[in-house]
Image (spheres, rainbow, N blue to C red):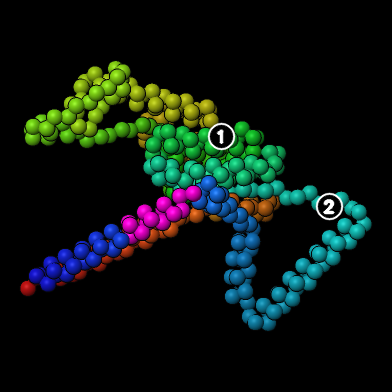
Amino acid sequence: MEFLTEFGLFIAKTVTLVVALLVIVSVVLSAAHKDKDDQGSDGELRVRKLNEKYRKLRESLQAKLRSDSERKAFEKARKKEDKAKQKAAKAKRKSGDAEEKPRPKVYVLDFDGDIKASDTDSLRRSITAVLSVAEPETDEVVIRLESGGGLVHSYGLAAAQLDRIRAKGIRLTACVDKVAASGGYMMACVADRIVASPFAILGSIGVVAQLPNFHRFLKKNDVDFEILTAGEHKRTMTVFGENTDKGRTKFLEDLEDTHVLFKEYVGERRPELDIAAVANGDIWFGRRALEVKLVDEIKTSDEYLIEACDSADVISVGFQRKRTLPEKLGLATSAALEHTVWRVLGAFRNQKIQ
């Protein structure tokens, strides 16, 4: 046990030294690269045609199931077919015939929400790009949405970004494979149609606030804490001061008003919902959500997009922000610390005391 204690202290000192060095390096590099965002190097738009992705998956499996002779015959037939299509298209252009109308396009966006809806900026940029090329009468936007909700103002902004799509008259579909609850459902309800997997979690149309209070602890230790405000309702609840019944009442009124706004927002976008029945904070799984009309169809996002490939060009669009070197170092440090902690805990857990 003495050896393990010394080993643990050695690891702790080593990790502390490494973290300190990385912090210093991060600060220096951050200062050196602080103007990069202004130079337009903060990220890039990534576009991928999903029709090709699904086709390659199918052909890859088909190739593995065929014998060598069958595979060669298949490749030969496909090349012949491609050449015939190219020849026909060339002849059509020479004859002056009108070209075929372009296929409709389905633009696929992704949103993976945390408590602060941090993905909103990437979503905003992706939507701006899509709206510059999408055709209202033929094209569609699909948002693959995963979020358990979070801060009201953050998810309000994320939902407002999706409202931009509706405002342009472009059809919007929300696909939920796992969860779209609270702020996540606030975003989903903007869509013309919500598609969810059988056990996806939806709903939680409610508002919650919670905070600890250390007033009695501070008072017991003779620590004074003063709050100076201008305005009767500038601070209704506090972590360190003494909370009053009047402050609690005002805070609850604000929560109720936020809930009313939430219900109105959902009700305007899904008028077929019985808001009184579903806006009580409960959650529903996919099939149950269909029964109460929180969603319109039970289907995974993969099913929906593969079916769309039959009649449209399905294109994944995403803005990926480039991480700065300090951010990469921070992520690496975090991963290293987590790995070290688990190894040390594992060593102690597996050690038997004789």
Q: Is residue 230 left or right of residue 105?
A: left
Q: Residue furthest right?
A: 95
Q: How many marks?
A: 2
How far from the left and from the top, in percent, is residue 33? 46, 53
Q: Is residue 116 above or below residue 26?
A: above
Q: CA distance from mark 1 to mark 2?
A: 34 Å
Q: Which residues are magenta?
A: 22-35
Task: Residue type at mark 2: give it.
Answer: Glu
The residue positioned 44% from the left and 54% from the top of the image is 32
The residue positioned 26% from the left and 27% from the top of the image is 237
Using a 10 Å C-alpha cutoff, classify the residue at mark 2 as few (fewer than 14 neighbours), some (14 to 19) or many (20 or more).
few
The residue positioned 84% from the left and 60% from the top of the image is 89
Residue behind mark 2: 99
Query: Is residue 82 visible from the viewing direction of this image?
Result: yes
Secondary structure under tag 2 reads loop
Quick check: is 29 in the magenta stretch? Answer: yes
**Camera-side residue of 231 and 349:** 231
How far from the left and from the top, in percent, is residue 301? 53, 51
Q: Is residue 61 above or below residue 113?
A: below
| Residue 22, quarter of picture | bottom left
- In the rendered structure, find residue 163 and report the number of the disc placed on it: 1
